[in-house]
Amino acid sequence: MPMSAESLTGYVGNLEPWQEEKLRQFWATLIQLWDAHSSSRRTPEHTRRASLSSNDTNTTTTAKSPRRGFFSLTRQTTTQATDDDSPPSPVPPMFLPMLKTLGATPSDLKAAYSLLTKISGDRLQTAYLRALKQEHPDAQLLRFLRAEKWNVPRAWIKFVSALHWRTNEYRIDEEVLCKGEKYHLERSRQEEDSVEKRDGENFMMQLRSGKGFFHGADRYGRPICVIRARAHTPSEKALGSLRDYIVHCIETVRFLQVAPVETMTILFDLTSFSLSSWDFPAVKFIIECFQENYPESLGAIIFYKAPWFFSGLWKLIQAILDPVVAAKVYFIDGPRDLERIVPPSQIIRELGGRENWEYRYQEPLPCEDDRLHDTATRDSIFAERRALGEELFAVTAEWIADPESYGWVEPRELAIMKMHDNYWTLDPYVRARTLLDRTGVIKDGGIVDFYPARTNVQVYDEKPAVVGDWVIGVPVMA
């Protein structure tokens, strides 16, 4: 029998007391870091400079009197920096001892120190505010806690590693979200042959071919990504643009996960699949992306109509899958079995279902990304986001200090709602439009309509996990 939503704990609104304590500890590690590197309230100029530049360095400001920190182990005031002070250490004195009290091993402490030399203090806070998007702040941290089996130091390491990857390595906001489909279209139209032109052509080919696409939701409200494996032709020359396309898709699906939904379903359509389409580097990149940078984002992975020889390829895939992820893998042989996860009216005809829908790519519109160039408005809205972040961190510190008072509950819920609304005001200034925006799936204000051409389509609550006796195909356990 499937598990009921009420029986699953570890999610927002359904935490055991010990899980809530772990969440408070996780928040405490972050707030202590930000507090130690924020010696006074930011000036408007500091806020503007720190808002969206990934190349900013930690900045300290002078103040006439110290302020009480949001949270620290000693609950003491922080020391103010002066013009004569040297730059603060990337690792506050009490931070590593704090991790140690939470169970960090020597290797954990070494990893934490290394991370803070790469991204710390103000840059870490900015990276967090940019990565949060419209997501519930607690839901985001809980995903990392569940992925690391509620080990707070290791969840912190995974979380900060993901922020470092987003900010310093892949530059998600600048290179993926802000540039988007129209940017690659323009590169593909360059007259001179170049690497940039070929990358643009390869990226647009992924979109136009329908090799992978998002359409609809399953019985639990999870957005569905269909990958037509037969349409893929491996190419080392196109691997860079393929990776960009994969990250573009992963980032896009985040906007389809409307609370309480936190995960997605990936369906690999293996109809007519042959070994000529097998691409282990691409598969490995997808797995590593989800496991390291987007943990607990997969609700189900379906291999649909797998040929007999796929069992050998599955062994290669299974070897690099986390056991928790591997337990969400299902082999399904036809539409009747698939109906256990997706209602028959929402299975497209291509997969043997009833829905008369075909993928068609709509080209970017000439002026759809004009607001990306309005940097003054962008910076103003992000300055508001930083101020709202300070408000959220302050009331979260109250929760950490006195969880039994409950005076923090309503102000914290209000702060979280303001952060959500602020993102959707900011969205058109930081995110290029996608096919899902053009077709009306993602609407202004973050409203998601999986079936914009229909009305009154029922979308189910997500929380029950897909379990074996719901699927006639055998669930694969690690």
Image: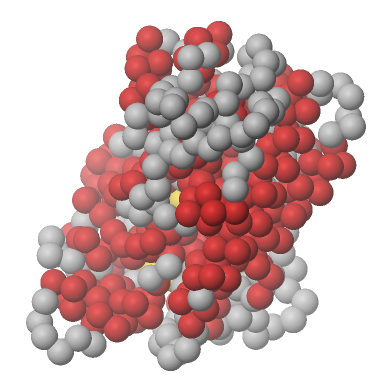
Check the picture and name the quadrant holding the N terminus: top right
User: Along the horizontal axis of the image, is 336 left or right of 8?
Assistant: left
* Total marks in image: 0
- Give x and y (percent) for residue 199: 21, 72
Q: Is residue 404 visible?
A: yes
In which quarter of the view is residue 407 placed?
Answer: top right
- Give x and y (percent) for residue 191: 15, 89
Which of 390 and 76 lies nearest the eye of the viewer?
A: 76
In which quarter of the view is residue 423 placed?
Answer: bottom right
Question: In the image, what residue occupies the spot 48% across and 54% down?
Answer: 49
- Give x and y (percent) for residue 200: 25, 76
With respect to residue 282, does 346 lie above or below?
below
In which quarter of the view is residue 120 placed?
Answer: top left
Which of 408 and 88 lies nearest the eye of the viewer?
A: 88
- Give x and y (percent) for residue 360: 44, 85
Q: Is residue 474 visible?
A: no
With respect to residue 258, does 78 lie above or below?
above
Question: In the image, what residue occupies the spot 65% across and 85% down?
Answer: 453
Question: In the image, what residue occupies the spot 47% across and 80% down?
Answer: 369
Check the picture and name the quadrant holding the C terminus: top left
User: Along the horizontal axis of the image, is 259 left or right of 166?
Assistant: right
The colour scheme of the drawn protein is: secondary structure
Q: Residue furthest left?
A: 193
Question: In the image, what residue occupies the spot 42% across and 10% down?
Answer: 105
